[in-house]
């Protein structure tokens, strides 16, 4: 059997989210296809794998009875659900940070393609995409120059994010109680709590978790425009952070971002639309401040990880 693609793995993880709520006890090919937005063929493949995993059992009428709920370890790892371009963005970020490449550094197109293990054409398309965001500038002889992030560019991006992401969290707070989003939100909250418990790794691991957090919110809220550029925005901004922060400052900002995220999650889970908007605005303002100048006065906050009173559990 061929190895499942990243698309199948994403859909399978979505199916696990779908069967996680206790209120869900039966499903069929059509209902699962609709729930996770896949074809009936893919839905059948997912159900076959769920049967093998002991999560569902086929009934005589070709429906499926849910017999077990998924745990965190039952999901495909996040890195296995990334598309080729998403994997390349991650590899590119690691590459330029490992080489300590700052603004003005030069990238040779052919050498970059070789180190990334991709064709010259794919390398050129990827670098061209970054140049549209002002991060790279095309130079003669198939070379590229790193530009960094200007204040004007950062202001422009933050205006767009404020417009889309503050309305996104308010929309999420209105979701139905049985929506699979709540399982996704709980799952990412646990990731935040794990990183908070091991904060010494925060400066390294926070960029990936930050991108995952914002992607989850924007995807669940249907913000397709911001989703189309979210990964590149995250990559560019976190690259910039590494060049203006000292190590202890990066750790302090990671702690602050974790606190912001937990507060946003709390507001969404309690279905407080206005508070969710305010907390997202505060989070983006903190991120903007960090881009404007090095955050020398930031102190590591005392992070609260209590579970909020969830109004969705009330009858």
Image (cartoon, rainbow, N blue to C red):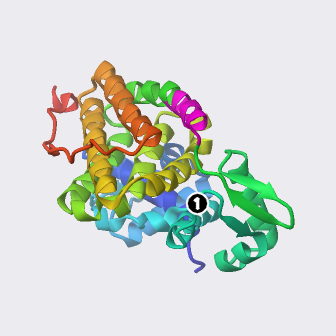
The residue under the point 54% across, 56% down is 43
> Dividing the picture into quarters, in which one does residue 314 lie?
top left
Name the spot of residue 70 as percent of width and height, x first: 30, 60
Magenta stretch, main secondary structure, is helix
The residue range painted magenta reads 150-161
Picture quarter with the C terminus: top left
Q: Is residue 175 above or below residue 118?
A: above
Depth order, front residue of 143/175? 143
Name the spot of residue 128 as percent of width and height, x first: 76, 55
The residue under the point 68% across, 45% down is 134
Lateral position of residue 144 relative to residue 174, left or right = right
> Dividing the picture into quarters, in which one does residue 285 lie?
top left
| Whether residue 62 can be seen here | no
The residue under the point 59% across, 41% down is 150
Name the spot of residue 152 as percent of width and height, x first: 60, 33
> On the image, numbered disc 1 is attached to which residue?
86
Lateral position of residue 146 relative to residue 144, left or right = left
Q: Seen from this angle, which residue lies furthest right?
A: 141
| Residue 47 drawn in magenta | no
Q: Is residue 30 above or below residue 143?
A: above
Name the spot of residue 204 as percent of width and height, x first: 37, 63
Picture quarter with the N terminus: bottom right
Depth order, front residue of 285/16? 285
Lateral position of residue 171 relative to residue 20, left or right = right
| Residue 160 drawn in magenta | yes
């Amino acid at each position: 059997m061929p190895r499942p693609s990243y698309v199948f793995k994403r859909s399978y993880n979505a199916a696990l989210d779908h069967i996680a709520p206790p209120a869900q006890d039966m499903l069929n090919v059509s209902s699962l296809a609709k729930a996770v937005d896949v074809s009936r063929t893919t839905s059948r493949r997912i159900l076959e794998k769920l049967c093998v995993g002991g999560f569902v059992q086929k009934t005589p009428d070709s429906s499926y009875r849910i017999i077990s709920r998924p745990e965190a370890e039952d999901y495909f790892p996040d890195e296995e659900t990334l598309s080729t371009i998403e994997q390349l963005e991650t590899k590119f970020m690691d590459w330029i940070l490992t080489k300590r490449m700052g603004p003005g550094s030069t990238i040779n197109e052919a050498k970059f393609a070789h180190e990334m293990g991709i064709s010259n054409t794919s390398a050129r398309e990827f670098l061209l995409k970054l140049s549209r965001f002002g991060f790279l500038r095309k130079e003669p002889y198939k070379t590229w120059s790193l530009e960094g992030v200007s204040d004007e560019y950062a202001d422009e991006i933050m205006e767009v994010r404020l417009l889309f992401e503050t309305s996104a969290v308010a929309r999420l707070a209105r979701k139905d109680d049985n929506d699979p989003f709540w399982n996704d939100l709980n799952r990412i909250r646990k990731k935040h709590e794990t990183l908070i418990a091991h904060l010494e790794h925060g400066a390294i691991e926070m960029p990936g978790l930050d991108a995952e957090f914002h992607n989850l919110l924007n995807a669940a809220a249907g913000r397709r425009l911001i989703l189309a550029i979210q990964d590149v925005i995250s990559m560019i901004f976190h690259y910039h952070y590494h060049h203006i922060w000292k190590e202890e400052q990066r750790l302090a900002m990671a702690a602050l971002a974790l606190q912001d995220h937990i507060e946003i999650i709390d507001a969404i889970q309690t279905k407080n639309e206005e508070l969710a908007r305010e907390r997202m605005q505060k989070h983006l303002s903190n991120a903007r401040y960090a881009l404007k100048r090095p955050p020398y006065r930031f102190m590591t906050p005392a992070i609260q990880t209590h579970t909020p009173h969830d109004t969705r559990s009330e009858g």
